[in-house]
Image (cartoon, helix red, strand yellow):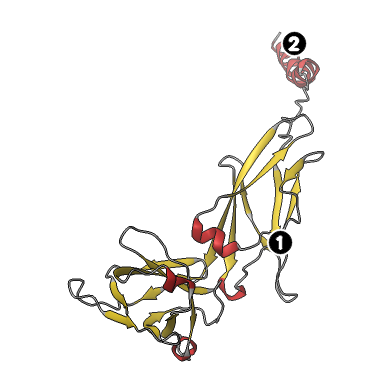
Amino acid sequence: MIRMQLRHGLLCALLAPVLFSACKKTETIAPPALPSAQIVEFSITNVPETESVIRGAVDHEAGTVTVYLPAYLQLPVLMPQIKVTEGATVTPASGTQINDLLVKIRKGEKLSYTVKGKDGAEKSYALNIISQQPTTMVNELTIDPSNPKTYTLTADQYTYIALQFSSENIIVENREEMVSIVLIDAAGNELPPIPGGGPYYWYATHKAFEAQVYRTSPAYAALAADGLYKIKVYNYGQSVTLQNPIRIIKQ
């Protein structure tokens, strides 16, 4: 009797996996469909041959593309190549050059792309451009705000005032799109930019630069006869606004 029970138990143990396997069902679950309107890849390609293309970080949830620009490249123009989901289109189109990049950054102009899928779905991406440059530092021209440093322009058309700054991390490029100075009047209006120049601008240690305001410059025409002005320094993708104003007198 005991032997029969043992044999019965052994048989059940052997048959159990077979019976379990026979009852098990295999279900195939299809992966969720990919969105029809997405940016898959975003790259900046107008870089020197010795450099790799700059890859943008695409965040589908936030709807952003973030591009980090190496400061040593000093790119005032960008040429993006964009890959989107199959059958989709993107506006502006891939390969559309972004001109006047730094002007757009300084004016706070928003850059964006819209992807339209073959099913009509749409998604927009904001383009964030970040310059990986060290922090710009510029020292005040006026030490005591109650006694602003004064500059005088005489009637001679060749007369100019030289704004000489001590600074850190100013890019040594005598081009307005890289470094320029803007005077801001008491009402908060920005006057036409003054490009960096002069011998101090080319100082070897990058610790000083100069901006010259001539009577023939666009900024001169916007000056009051006697006014206070704050100074904003644009250095590639960064800007610094000095807190203490200067005084400019036109004679």
Front-most of residues 232 and 249: 249
Please, what is the three-letter code of the amino acid marked with disc 2? Answer: Met
Which residue sits at x=31%, y=81%? 151
Task: Please provide percent x and percent y for residue 111.
Answer: 60, 51
Return the residue found at the far top: 1
Query: Are the residues flagged by discs 2 and 1 in contact, CB closer than 8 Å?
Result: no
User: Is residue 57 visible in this depiction of the protein?
Assistant: yes
Q: Amino acid at mark 1?
A: Met
- Number of residue marks: 2
Q: In what element is the residue under mark 1?
A: loop
Position of the N terminus by quadrant: top right
In the rendered image, which residue does mark 1 sit on? 79
Percent across and percent down for residue 214 are: 44, 81
Decide which of 197, 48 is in the foreground and name it: 197
Q: How many C-alpha atoms fall within 10 Å of the one at disc 2: few (<14), some, or many (≥20)?
A: few
Q: Residue at x 73, y 34 (%)?
A: 34
Quarter where residue 169 is shown: bottom left
Q: Nearer the viewer, residue 4 or 245?
A: 245
In the image: residue 88, left or right of residue 39: right
Query: The C terminus is located in which quarter?
Result: bottom left
Q: Residue furthest left?
A: 146
Q: What's the CA distance linking mark 2 and mark 1?
A: 84 Å
The label on residue 197 is none
**Relative image position of residue 41 (x, y in whole percent):** 71, 51
Residue at 53% in and 67% down: 132
**N-term mark: 2 or 1:** 2
Residue 238 lies, in percent from the top left, at: 47, 66
Which residue has dot 2 on it? 4
Residue at the image point whose x is 32% and y is 58% from the top: 187
Decide if residue 79 is on the left or right side of residue 188. Answer: right
Left or right relative to 226: residue 162:
right
